[in-house]
Amino acid sequence: MIAGVEDALLPVLPSKPASTNPTNEVAKRLTGRDYISWSALSTFRTCPLKYKFRYVDGLREESVSSALIFGTGIHTAVEQHYQALLSGDPKPDLDALLFAYRSAWLPHEPDAIQFGSTETRASLDDLAARMLTAFLASPSASVQGRVLGVEEEIRGMLVEGVPDLYGRVDLLTEDADTLVVTDIKTSRGKWSQEQVEDSGEQLLLYSHLASEISPGKKIATRFLVLTKTKEPVVEEHVREVEPGNVKRTLAGVERVWRAIESGVFYPAPSTMNCASCGYRAACRAWAG
């Protein structure tokens, strides 16, 4: 969580009692963490062996893609902007946002970063400047209603027999009748409606947990997409949460957890996913 957010949120978001979910102890025995995250669920669905390497064995990745670091940096910068709105501080200018963006690169050794064939650090820094300039000039830089949380921690039981879901919501806002759960994304191009639908599961789960924050209000999910195009565009995709979609997503979470709990881990080769995987050497060495 960004420094200062927790104290700033105390008057707005109620504290929750400690969880008594018994399945949390099962998760702790498997991974050392008494919860499950959306990232863990997604990793298992993509490749069960990658899940084992990361969450069970605790292996460090051999490399990290520049796209992942870049996306984290843009997230950090945009979140700093909204943090200023939350705390009532002056809005950060472009230089301040670029400073936040660059901080994402600091923990990584340059030799361990995988750049795309046409990418350099300088070209990505230039792209970040153009994207953040577009963001500051867009209507998305303002908020309708009020900001409730930035990088807000959220946790709770979704399904009986499944550990608590833990996550961080990029942005929580509300107006007179709607609570909006926002996820910030970077993308190579504009999103289609199919991409919005295919990417919605995480926000549906977060919205399910967030419904306790503003009882009686409608819940909406929102993707804030910054495109990595020559002329960056800032898009908003807002959808009201439909209970049927939540129910389907919860059923999927339960099935994935059952598979994780069974301990059946195997590789799932994919041209798209394997190329940027940080466990390629460990995967090649795996013998079952």
Image (cartoon, helix red, strand yellow):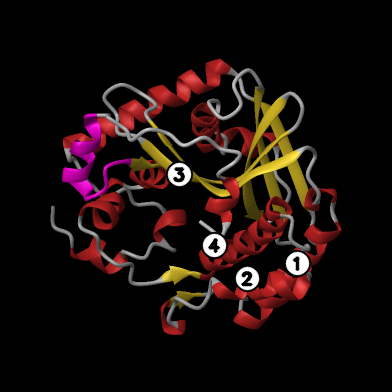
Instruction: Specify which label sits upstream in the sequence, 3 or 2.
Output: 2
Q: Which residue is mark 1?
A: 92
- Callout 2–callout 1 Cβ contact below 8 Å: yes
When the figure is inspected, residue 242 is found, relative to residue 175, above or below; the finding is above
Q: Which residues are magenta?
A: 22-35
Amino acid under disc 4: Ala
- Callout 4–callout 1 Cβ contact below 8 Å: no
Q: Residue 3: x, y in percent?
A: 54, 62
Amino acid under disc 3: Gly
When asked about the image quadrant of residue 192, the answer is top right
- Callout 2–callout 4 Cβ contact below 8 Å: no
When asked about the image quadrant of residue 161, the answer is top left
Numbered disc total: 4
Instruction: Specify which label sits upstream in the sequence, 3 or 4.
Output: 4
> Which mark's residue is nearer the viewer, 2 or 1?
1
Q: What SS does tag 4 mark?
A: loop
Q: Which residue is mark 2?
A: 100
Amino acid under disc 1: Pro
Q: Which residue is mark 4?
A: 3
Give the Cα separation between the discs numbered 3 and 4: 17 Å
